[in-house]
Image (spheres, rainbow, N blue to C red):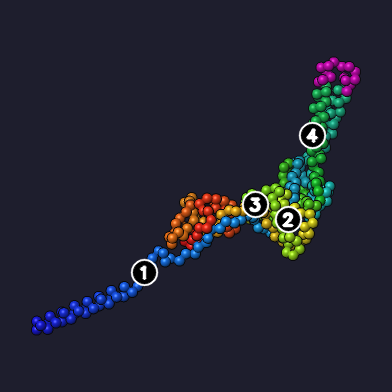
């Protein structure tokens, strides 16, 4: 019986050792990857040209308009109703309470002061009396002129021809209005320009006189320049800037449809240029990953100008290095 039990134990041990030996063989056959075997997408740093530019759509429009405000408090007796107006047309007439009576009364006082001064001056009155009469005459004249000005301000004329948009709700016939109240906006249709509207902030480094490349399909391919920048603020959905562009003479642009424009900021040759995606920024640090002898090495860089896909490297790279594109 003891011999049989010993044989069974030895058999179990042999089976266990055999199983263990099989596991060791499987582990020995598995591949082990070293860091040098990792495959990277790389880019060879180049010396080239980089330009900063902004791309937009433009169209011929009327960029200039003027807001008209009521100059004298009163009640509206007449208001312009059409959507287009001609220079010199009456936009609004006001009735100013007791204004004409004030003018008539002041005219009497002014005439009397003037007559007194002229009599003393011509008759050789005393110097003091004549000087006092002159001062009084000028004071009354200014009062009279101010009242006449108020009367003139009670009638508002269009300063130029164009489209007009009146605040119909506040400025209707019979409504009482006050000095400084908004009346309307007139768009000057005599001044047509090529315009590009840019939402949000102004374009960096685009100023008066900046060069613009203009292309309208197969019709025209020309240059132009920025002649004005007008801020537009009609709420969050429309805030931005209108860039007024003057095409070069003989550009041949047609006044219909959208036109492609490129604001050419500036161009630099013989600089170190890398793809924007290759540059990493963490905690205020800017760097690229270089591939050196199969290892990934972080290298700090200083950036220059940047366009939609590339950035200039001012320091940190010299050209010819291999940059790792994937992290």
Kindly check if marks 1 and 2 are in contact, taking CB atoms under 8 A apart as contact: no
Kindly check if marks 3 and 1 are in contact, taking CB atoms under 8 A apart as contact: no
Residue ID at (53%, 60%): 44
Residue ID at (50%, 52%): 316
The residue singled out by tag 2 in the image is 223
Say which label, 3 or 1, has the lower sequence index.
Answer: 1
The residue singled out by tag 1 in the image is 32
In the depicted view, which residue is nearer to us: 51 or 277? 51
Q: Main secondary structure of the magenta part?
A: helix
Q: Which disc number belongs to residue 146?
A: 4
Which residues make up the magenta segment? Answer: 118-132
CA gap, disc 2 and disc 3:
15 Å
Q: Can residue 284 be seen in this view?
A: yes
Say which label, 3 or 4, has the lower sequence index.
Answer: 4
Q: Does the magenta stretch include residue 206?
A: no
Residue ID at (48%, 62%): 326
Say which label, 4 or 2, has the lower sequence index.
Answer: 4
Say which label, 1 or 2, has the lower sequence index.
Answer: 1
Q: Which disc number belongs to residue 266?
A: 3
| Image quarter in which the N terminus is found | bottom left
Tell me the element at label 1.
loop
CA gap, disc 3 and disc 1:
52 Å
CA gap, disc 4 and disc 1:
97 Å
- For label 2, count other residues whose C-alpha is less than 10 Å away and answer few (under 14), some (14-19) or many (20+): some
Kindly check if marks 4 and 1 are in contact, taking CB atoms under 8 A apart as contact: no
Tell me the element at label 4.
helix
Residue 12 image-quadrant placement = bottom left
CA gap, disc 4 and disc 2:
52 Å
């Amino acid at each position: 019986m003891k011999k049989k039990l010993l044989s069974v134990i030895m058999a179990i041990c042999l089976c266990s050792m055999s199983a263990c030996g099989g596991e060791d063989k499987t582990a020995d056959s598995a591949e082990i990857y070293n860091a040098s075997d990792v495959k990277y997408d790389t880019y060879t740093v180049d010396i080239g040209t980089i330009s900063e530019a902004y791309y937009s759509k433009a169209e011929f429009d009327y960029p200039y308009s003027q807001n008209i405000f009521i100059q004298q408090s009163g009640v509206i007796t007449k208001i312009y109703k059409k959507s287009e107006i001609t220079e010199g047309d009456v936009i609004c007439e006001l009735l100013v309470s007791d204004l004409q009576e004030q003018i008539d009364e002041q005219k009497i006082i002014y005439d009397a002061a003037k007559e007194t001064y002229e009599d003393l001056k011509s008759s050789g009155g005393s110097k003091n009396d004549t000087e006092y009469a002159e001062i009084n005459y000028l004071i009354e004249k200014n009062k009279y002129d101010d009242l006449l000005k108020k009367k003139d301000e009670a009638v508002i004329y269009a300063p130029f021809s164009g489209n007009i948009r009146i605040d119909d709700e506040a400025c209707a016939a019979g409504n009482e209005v006050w000095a400084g109240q908004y009346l309307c906006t007139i768009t000057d249709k005599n001044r047509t320009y090529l315009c590009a509207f840019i939402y949000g902030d102004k374009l960096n480094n685009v100023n008066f006189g900046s060069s613009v490349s203009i292309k309208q399909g197969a019709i025209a391919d020309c240059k132009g320049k920025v002649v004005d920048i007008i801020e537009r603020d009609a709420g969050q959905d429309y805030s931005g800037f209108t860039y007024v562009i003057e095409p070069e003479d003989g550009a041949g642009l047609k006044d219909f449809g959208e036109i492609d424009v490129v604001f050419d900021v500036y161009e630099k040759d013989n600089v170190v240029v890398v793809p924007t995606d290759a540059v990493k920024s963490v905690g205020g640090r800017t760097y690229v990953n270089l591939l050196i002898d199969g290892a990934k090495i972080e290298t700090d860089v200083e950036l220059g100008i940047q366009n939609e896909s590339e950035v200039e490297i001012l320091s940190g790279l010299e050209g010819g290095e291999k940059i790792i594109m994937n992290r």
